[in-house]
Amino acid sequence: MKKESIYLDTSVPSAYFDSRAKERQEATIKFWKEIVPNYTIYISDLTEEELKSTKDEKRKNDLMDLIRTFKILRINSEVEELAREYIKNKLLPEKYINDALHIAIGSCNNISYIVSWNFEHIVKVKTRRIVKLVNTIQGYKEIEIISPQEL
């Protein structure tokens, strides 16, 4: 049987090493141990780029090591177009285009779940509703947007 797929935005691997939010870090480590092995995990070139911008060299190396086995999805014109549709439909302001791109990458690649700790822009009811509406209009399947604790 084919495994379901998960797309991780930057907030999830980042939380693995972020001891400032201990409860979130513990939940992320538990997610990595108990959930990740049961799914096909994807990140994007955007996720990789954002993680590579980490200033602390040890942390950056730890992050790169953490994601090294995941499949990388590329941003292309289809993804950019869908992200612009999300912005046009008031999902997010233009300045948060990267968050729209994360969602579009998952949608364009038929990912089962987008997993994020970003409760401000991604994991929220308004986002789920607009993404469902835009994806339906644009011919994409519905996608679940959840936090690591929901799997």
Image (spheres, rainbow, N blue to C red):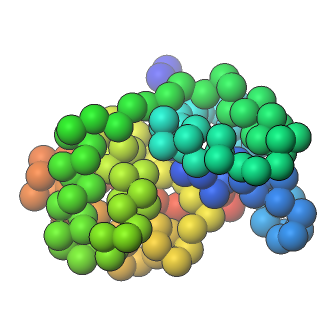
In the shown orientation, is residue 114 left or right of residue 90?
A: right
The residue under the point 24% across, 68% down is 87
Nearest the eye: 103 or 54? 54
Q: Note whether residue 112 is visible.
A: yes
Q: Position of residue 126 (x, y in %)?
A: 36, 79
Where is residue 4? Give x, y as percent.
49, 34
Q: Is residue 81 left or right of residue 104?
A: left
Q: For this rendering, which residue is in front, 59 or 150?
A: 59
Q: How many marks?
A: 0
Q: Kindly identify the residue that appears in the image at 36 percent across and 62 percent down.
A: 97
- Horizontal side of residue 114 vs 137, given as left or right: right
- Give the residue displayed 83% in from the left and 41% down from the top: 57
Q: Quadrant of residue 65?
A: top right
Q: Residue at x 57, y 59 (%)?
A: 116
Which residue is more in the foreground, 98 or 146?
Answer: 98
Q: Position of residue 86 (x, y in %)?
A: 24, 64
Inspect this view and state whether residue 141 appears. Answer: no
Q: Measured from the top left, where is residue 143 in percent x and y?
A: 36, 52
